[in-house]
Amino acid sequence: MSELNLVLLGPPGSGKGTQGERLQEDLRLPYYATGDILRAAVRDGTEIGRDAKQYMERGDLVPDDVIVGVIGERIHAKEAEDGFILDGFPRTEPQAEALGSKLTELGRELSAAVLIEVDDDEVVRRLGGRRTCPNGHVFHVEFDPPEKPGVCDVCGAELEVREDDQPDVIRRRLEQYHEKTKPLIAYYEGRGLLKHVDGALDAQEVAERIRALLATLKMEEEL
Ligand SMILES: [Zn+2]
């Protein structure tokens, strides 16, 4: 059986995490959200995990080669022999190159980079509509409104817009996202690996589009 080695790309609010989890179930492939596997490596105390821990404890960014090392450990395991789904890494072109080298070293290659596209206004609408109470209950003014505006259904506390969900903060994060991912997207496009999916559709429809494009990919591979 051929492998399905995937990278998921998309802005915050694109539903990337949701799609990653669905793909994990559908394809029975491990789903690696980079933050989670870094924390797991630290917890398990692997050699690379101990490396990563030193950076995290100092509050420094974990260098690309350390992250790639952690990913390499996971990819090289039996659980990922039929493929994997990677989310949260790479975020920049140098990271994509580092990941590419690691895969080559392991005798693997990327099958596709799936870009879930959502325009900035839609991201602001999705994330900016979130309302949170001090006890962590989350609502959305449009998609999941509380019964009484501004009041938490669960605990009755006042709902507020978190700092991260302020429209100007979201726009700033999006600017950074575009600045970093533009070269990354060009990198995968240049290698014929980039697959676009319209992330403005509802989650079910997005999942079906991804499934269809992966089926096509598989067919092409078998020809
Ligand atoms: Zn509450």
Image: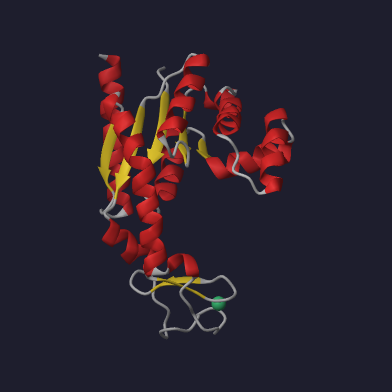
Q: Locate the C terminus and report the quarter of the image it occupies.
A: top left
Determine the image quadrant of residue 94: top left
Q: Residue at x 62, y 40 (%)?
A: 38
Determine the image quadrant of residue 74: top right
Where's residue 75, x and y in %? 54, 26
Colour mode of the rendering: secondary structure
Q: Of residues 124 and 32, which is closer to you in this image?
A: 124
Q: Residue at x 61, y 26 (%)?
A: 73
60 to the left or right of 165:
right
Where's residue 146, x and y in %? 42, 79
Q: Is any part of residue 27 visible from this angle?
A: yes
Q: Locate the N terminus and report the quarter of the image it occupies.
A: top left
Where's residue 63, x and y in %? 58, 35
Q: How many marks?
A: 0
Q: Of residues 173 and 159, which is closer to you in this image?
A: 173
40 to the left or right of 85:
right
Ligand 1, seen in the image, is in the quarter at bottom right
Q: Residue at x 47, y 65 (%)?
A: 164
42 to the left or right of 127:
right
Where's residue 48, x and y in %? 68, 30
32 to the left or right of 116:
right
Q: Residue at x 70, y 34 (%)?
A: 51
Q: Of residues 63 and 81, which is closer to you in this image?
A: 63
Q: Tell me: residue 22, above or below residue 185.
A: below
Q: Is any part of residue 10 visible from this angle?
A: no
